[in-house]
Amino acid sequence: MNANSDAIIRFVKNRRKQLGITQEELSRRAGVGLRFIRDMEQGKESLRMDKVNQVLGLFGHKVGPVPVKDQE
């Protein structure tokens, strides 16, 4: 995991808890499976970005390309 994915995980967990909704309700509202929400909140490294954006879209956010520095 990297700092960007850690920030996304914290954001989703915090917003879900602030709204007082369960993982199950979040999955239903976002149109993704409960397993996806659980994997996302547990930091699974290989998640489909379109689904991540479905979840983030509920909170008015989305993820886009992030530049990667050349490693020399």
Image (cartoon, grey):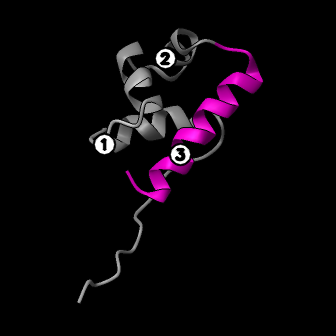
43 and 61: which one is in front? 43
Marks 3/2: CA distance? 16 Å
Q: Is residue 15 above or below residue 37?
A: below
Marks 1/2: CA distance? 18 Å
Q: Which residue is denoted by mark 2 in the rendering?
A: 27
- The disc labelled 2 sits on which kind of residue? Ser
Is the residue under label 1 in contact with that under label 3 (CB below 8 Å)?
no
Instruction: State yes or no: residue 22 in magenta.
Output: no
Marks 3/1: CA distance? 12 Å
Rendered residue at 42%/67% (across/down): 66
Q: Secondary structure at mark 3?
A: helix
| Secondary structure mostly taken by the magenta-highlighted segment of the chain | helix
Of pointers 3 and 2, the one earlier in the residue sequence: 3
- The disc labelled 1 sits on which kind of residue? Glu
Q: Which residue is denoted by mark 1 in the rendering?
A: 45
In front of the other: label 3 or label 2?
3
Q: Which residues are magenta?
A: 1-21
Q: Secondary structure at mark 2?
A: helix
Q: Which residue is denoted by mark 3 in the rendering?
A: 8
Q: Position of residue 49 (x, y in %)?
A: 35, 44
Residue 64: image quadrant is bottom left
Please tell me the numbered disc located at residue 33.
Answer: none
Label 2 crowd (10 A; few <14 / some 14-19 / many >=20): some
Q: Position of residue 22 (x, y in %)?
A: 60, 12
Rendered residue at 36%/16% (across/down): 35
Q: Is residue 16 above or below residue 67?
A: above
- Would residue 57 appear left or right of 64 to someone viewing this image? right
- Would residue 38 appear left or right of 16 to someone viewing this image? left
